[in-house]
Image: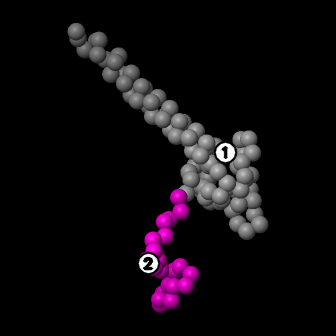
Amino acid sequence: MGIEFLLPLLLLLPLVLITMRTRRQQREMGDLQQRLAPGQEVMTTSGAYGTVVSLVDDRVVLKVADGVEMTWARPAVARIITPPVEMPGTDVPGTPGDDRPGA
């Protein structure tokens, strides 16, 4: 068993790894598309943030500002933003009701 036998296998290994990675990413995006629901804050592939208003077939309607709704293709949603969990008794500078100077 010489190097001639192992060389083709070594050349195919990166191709197999790339294919597996691509399939995993496609599966994750499909899962994300299925988890979309009204009321979720999301980010699109172009970096726009909005709240899901409704889902219609292959489109998602996002509220991006008060009175401004935009329709996007579902695949344009890159990720679901998880809002920060508010911990009782913690004060975050700059939040409403924060009386500290510089807030």
Q: Does residue 63 appear left or right of residue 16 in this picture?
A: right
Q: Is residue 85 magenta?
A: yes
In the rendered image, the vertical position of residue 59 relative to residue 100, given as above or below: above
Q: Nearer the viewer, residue 28 or 39?
A: 39
Name the spot of residue 76 as percent of width and height, x first: 64, 47
Disc 1, SS:
helix
Q: Is residue 6 magenta?
A: no
Q: Nearer the viewer, residue 66 or 76?
A: 66
- The quadrant in which the N terminus is found is top left
Q: What secondary structure is the magenta-colored segment mainly?
A: loop
Residue range of the region highlighted in magenta in the rendering: 82-103
* Residue drawn at 51 percent across, 85 percent down: 98
Foreground mark, 1 or 2? 2
Q: Mark 2 belongs to which amino acid?
A: Gly
Q: Choose top left, top right, bottom left or bottom right for residue 49.
A: bottom right
Q: Earlier in the sequence, mark 1 or mark 2?
A: 1
Residue 100 visible to an observer of this rendering = yes
* Residue drawn at 53 percent across, 36 percent down: 27
Q: Does residue 26 appear left or right of residue 10 in this picture?
A: right
Residue 74: mark: 1
Name the spot of residue 78 as percent of width and height, x first: 58, 49
In the rendered image, the vertical position of residue 98 relative to residue 20, given as above or below: below
Name the spot of residue 81 as percent of width and height, x first: 55, 57
In the rendered image, the vertical position of residue 93 relative to residue 28, given as above or below: below
Q: Which residue is mark 2?
A: 89
Q: Mark 1 belongs to which amino acid?
A: Arg
